[in-house]
Image (spheres, rainbow, N blue to C red):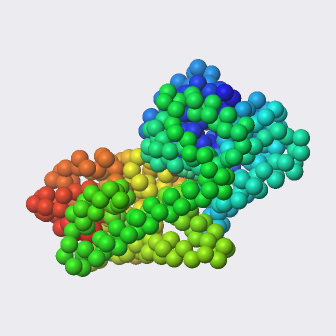
Amino acid sequence: MNVCVIGTGYVGLPTGVGFAELGNKTICVDKIEEKIAALNDGKITLFEEGLEELFHKNVANGNLKFTTATSEAVPNADIIIIAVGTPPNPATKEADMRYIYEAASEIAEHLSGYTVIATKSTVPVGVGDEVEKIIGGKNPKADFDVVSMPEFLREGFAVYDFFNPDRVVIGTNRDRAKTVIEALYGSYKQKPNILYTSRKSAELIKYASNAFLAVKIHYINEIANLCEKVGANVYEAAKGMGLDSRIGSKFLNPGPGYGGSCFPKDTNALAYLARKANVDLTIVETAIKGNDNRKIDMARRIIDAAKGIAGASIAILGLAFKGGTDDVRESPAIEIIAELLKNGFKIKAYDPKATQSAKAVLGDRIEYAVSVNDAAKDADILVVLTEWEEFKSISLKELQMRTKIIVDLRKTFDKRIAQADGFTYIGIGE
Ligand code: NAD
């Protein structure tokens, strides 16, 4: 099939590469000329495990192309997948649909033959209707259907998730569109099950799912706080809770708060949608507020650990919002560092992949280390903020710190081993 993907970010690029790998002629469009120039130059623009290899392979075999010109990419497409950003409006926190509507309007004039337009970006309920109106208004002769195709990939596992989706949800009631969708997913070795819903339900499923996971994270963080006060252990509690199949063990890891480009933005957008519809979504509102406070509380925990150390310097391990990605959008690490900087601490940070992205946000306000040992050298406090696998094999004995204090917000180390190695260990919920 001929696939066109609009937007080459954390969703669009793995999607384009994935459909190309499945044998579809895929062309990816982005507005940012430097991004497309880099991709056309054989340089991958973001980190996802396994993506680079598939990218090179499919560029070489001619299945994958990149352009800035919608006019070049759209006319031949059987399906156009919109994967542009839907950032929060800074004032209201509602999802800003500007890029979606721009993309719809750019697509409209170049449509040729029957085309399915699939919105993969996370959009509020009803945006599919709006996209349909924009395209129909600009090009009344166009033959098209707009479907909702929400994305559920996990950053850090985008390639794995593309080829092994838990679920594929498609919002449409149009048979012609379903035939195109079936053909597209027919290119999988094993065709995933597709759940067809109304377009609006599909749009809602994405927000309701993300908000549910955010609430679950916030819940275990609050249980962790309670454990600290009453002498229980949150890891034992989470294990015991997770054995109940109705609860499930995932997303029961306490930490410094959820972050990333999705949970904060999508919880806010859902809460906004509910307020506008005069519906109480108090549980989501509470999680949003609690998660904001969580990051400040965790910064406070580090500040308290530094009490009594003159000119304390802090080694930070992890800048990405989670392990396996170079994405620092809404990363708790960035917010906690900002709070520490306000309090005058000297910081040296190490992240296996996210140093460049973090530099774009934090600039030279902190130092960047090239390894764990480099970050920890002469530091007073070692703080773990991202759950990178690499950190689990750190040998604490080898770190040349000035003072041996660990604030472990990701349960990277075993408390007893750290203590046996002479460290003061401050964790979460135990
Ligand atoms: P991103 O910011 O990484 O990428 C968006 C890209 O779209 C940018 O490169 C931008 O230049 C491009 N773009 C914007 N307008 C364009 C236009 N008119 N034509 C061509 N390109 C255009 O965003 P992302 O993280 O990939 O997220 C995209 C959407 O997917 C969002 O709605 C997000 O909520 C949703 N989503 C993201 C994830 C995730 O893990 N990142 C997961 C599921 C869903």
Q: Which residue occupies the extreme right position in the image?
A: 140
Q: Answer with the quarter of the image where residue 125 lies.
A: bottom right
Does 340 sit left or right of 60 as displayed?
left
**Picture coordinates of residue 121 (x, y %)?**
63, 51
Q: Residue at x 50, y 45 (%)?
A: 167
Q: Residue at x 22, y 59 (%)?
A: 401
Q: Residue at x 52, y 39 (%)?
A: 193
Name the foreground residue: 404 vs 200: 200
Q: Answer with the quarter of the image where residue 14 lies.
A: top right
Please state, as top left, top right, bottom left or bottom right, where the N terminus lies in the image.
Answer: top right
Name the foreground residue: 391 vs 137: 137
Tell me if residue 312 can be seen.
Answer: no
**Above/below status of 317 relative to 141:** below
Q: Residue at x 38, y 69 (%)?
A: 219
Does 292 sit left or right of 2 as displayed?
left
**Above/below status of 72 relative to 327:** above
Please state, as top left, top right, bottom left or bottom right, where the C terminus lies in the image.
Answer: bottom left
Does 265 sit left or right of 423 as displayed?
right
**Picture coordinates of residue 214 (x, y %)?**
45, 64
Q: Which residue occupies the extreme top position in the image?
A: 61
Tell me if residue 204 can be seen.
Answer: yes
Name the foreground residue: 293 vs 182: 182
**Picture coordinates of residue 143 (x, y %)?**
82, 39
Total count of labels: 0
